[in-house]
Amino acid sequence: MANKKISQLVGIGTSSTVSGTFLLPVGAGSSSGPYTTNKITTSELASYIFTGDSGGGGFPATALSGQKDVYFNNPNYQNTTAAADGVDYAYLMLKTSNGLLTTGSGIARPVGGDNLGNHTATTTLNMQDNIINNVGQSINFQDGGNVGSTASEISIAHGTKIRLDAPTVQLGDADNVTVNGSFSARSADFAGAITGDSLEVQGASYHNVTALSSNTIDWRDGNIQHRTINQNTSMTFQANTLKEGQTLTLYVENSDTDPHTIYFRSGANTGNVLFPPMPESVKHVVNSTPGISGRKTNVYTFVNIHTGIFASSVTGYVY
């Protein structure tokens, strides 16, 4: 069949598929000729444009090759230096000024840094000994989150203040916490033990005053307690609540106009609470415990040493 002019060829319609059935003529040979006219399919031409001839190895080439810069002239490409939305990330980095392809290895770090946006990690983030700087207002951990290290120590430093705000703060796995240097403790409800060779308090030290609702004294309720009576009274120390060396100051007010006796029991008898011998001139003495005159208040001091509770008293306050 005779060759047709270009103008005589039927154009490709909008529904026509460009495939291997569309053939194009090409001239093959050295740069100076002679040339041989060969046929090439559109698929082979596309493969050549994007992959080259694979060093003369034929079509299609096995990989993208070439040593020239690659540009994309598409005004709608995604600028990967802009804020990402967490879903649409470009995998070819483009230089925004001219569309130059800058990497082919996925999301890379462009000049000036990458706005990672709201990324969700699917594996452990390895910083390779690099530092994370300029963290925002807070770092939130999920349940079980922690900061750990196998190095000799972790240092947390701040020029103003480090605040630990939690219902419970634990320092170490053991009960013993060692503090070298000055230490300031302020707490509205401290429960625990402070032990060491010595403890020095500079400034005021005070205890809360506990009002007794019954005639049973629990040493754990505080070192200063008080009770109001209006009749002869026997007060009992609750067993297993006192500690060796603990002191207790107790004031007892007699709200009645008549004098009343009072004595203290620890265990099975009152002999475990030891008052010094009182002179006969002191009224209302039971088991050497000074009683309380009408409308007066006594202050009793107890010290637990070894197996005894040693007591003393100051009587007759008008209170």
Image (cartoon, grey):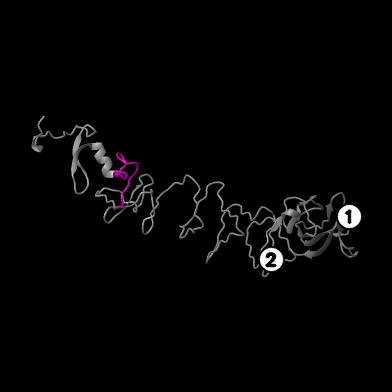
Q: How far across and how far down the image is residue 27, in percent? A: 19, 42
Q: Which quadrant of the figure contains the C terminus?
A: bottom right
Q: Nearer the viewer, residue 254 or 121?
A: 121
Of callouts 2 and 1, the N-terminal one: 2
Q: Residue at x 73, y 57 (%)?
A: 225
Q: Residue at x 32, y 41 (%)?
A: 57
Q: How far across and how far down the image is residue 177, in percent? A: 68, 59
Instruction: Give the alpha-carbon distance from disc 2 to disc 1, as whole Å.
Output: 33 Å
Q: Residue furthest top?
A: 1
Label 2 belongs to which residue?
205
The part of the image, by quadrant, that contains residue 209 is: bottom right
The kind of residue tagged 1 is: Gly
The part of the image, by quadrant, that contains residue 43 is: top left
Q: Nearer the viewer, residue 291 or 164?
A: 164
Label 1 belongs to which residue?
271
- In the rendered structure, the answer to whether residue 317 lies left or right of residue 168 reads right
Q: Residues within 10 Å of mark 1 (few under 14, many from 20)?
A: some
Closer to viewer: mark 2 or mark 1: 2
Q: Residues within 10 Å of mark 2 (few under 14, many from 20)?
A: few
Q: Residue furthest bottom?
A: 202
Highlighted range, magenta: 51-67
Q: Residue furthest front?
A: 34
Badge 2 vs badge 1, beta-carbon distance below 8 Å? no
The kind of residue tagged 2 is: Ser
Q: How far across and how far down the image is residue 156, in percent? A: 56, 61
| Badge 1 element | helix
Mark drawn on residue 176? none
Q: Residue at x 55, y 49 (%)?
A: 145
